[in-house]
Amino acid sequence: MALWKDSNSPGSGFASGSASAPPAPRDAAPNVAPLPEAQRRTGAARADAKESLIASGLTLEGKINGTGHVRVAGRFKGDVHIDGTLTLDSGARLEGHVKAAAVIVGGELIGNIVDAQQVDLREGGRIEGDIKAGSFTVASGARMRGKVEFGWDRSAGSATETLAESVITGTV
């Protein structure tokens, strides 16, 4: 859902260069940051993927599903299921379960992370919950309370599944 119309698109109601077109901001620089390392490694960054932002000072509750990237600078309560990267900025808080290609935690996450290719727990970041990921990076000064499983190939099954099968069949 767009909150504005592109003044250069056909049917927008404004002719290019007409006197009735709204002036473009002259000093507004695009808010574009370089892609985080996790996005480059996982391939989660696509040229057509957009980033949605929950700004600081905002508190939202609900569910997030879809493709693209999500950056949380405020507070969000609910589950997140995206094909892109979820980034929690310093001071942000998310309460809910996360399924994303890559997760970068600089704030606080209360919930589980499942099926992520990459999880980066940054300095000052905090996770209370379990993590299942392809790789997991922890910076000095980060905190976590929960169980972590990483580095397992999905096709080979996890060590817990293999052990459970061995115990059930009576072989160890």
Image (tube, helix red, strand yellow):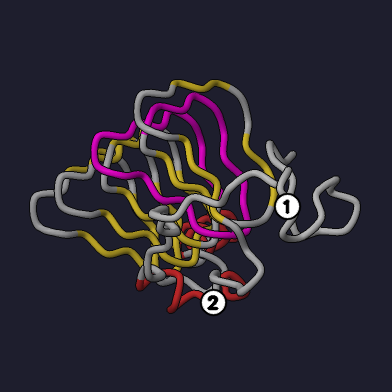
In magenta stretch: residue 77: yes
Mark 2 highlights which residue? Answer: 43
Q: How many marks?
A: 2
Q: Residue furthest front?
A: 19
Residue at the far left in the pictured view: 141
Q: Residues within 10 Å of mark 2 (few under 14, many from 20)?
A: few
Q: Quadrant of the C terminus?
A: bottom left
For label 2, the SS is loop
The residue tagged 1 is 6
Residue 126 screen position, x and y as percent: 24, 40
**Amino acid type, mark 2:** Gly
Q: Position of residue 5 (x, y in %)?
A: 74, 45
Placement of 74 over or under 103, stated as above or below: above
Report x, y in % for residue 85: 50, 58
Does residue 107 appear left or right of residue 131 in this picture? Answer: left
Q: Give the residue drawn at x 40%, y 58%.
A: 29
Q: Tell me the distance, in whole angstroms, between the alpha carbons under discs 1 and 2.
A: 30 Å
Residue depicted at x 36% and y 37%: 73
Pick whichever of labels 1 and 2 is earlier in the sequence: 1
From the viewer's perspective, tell me whether residue 130 is left or right of residue 10. left
Q: Name the amino acid type tagged 1.
A: Asp
Q: Quadrant of residue 74?
A: top left
Residues rendered magenta in the picture: 74-99
Q: How crowded is the residue under tag 1: few (<14 C-alpha within 10 Å), some, or many (20+)?
A: few
Q: Residue at x 84, y 48 (%)?
A: 12
Name the residue: 58% across, 54% down: 168
Nearest the viewer among 37 and 166 is 37
Locate residue 91 relative to residue 10 in the image: left or right. Answer: left
Residue at the limit of the structure toward the right, as seen here: 11
Q: Determine contact: label 1, label 2, CB under 8 Å.
A: no
- In this picture, residue 53 sits left or right of residue 136: right
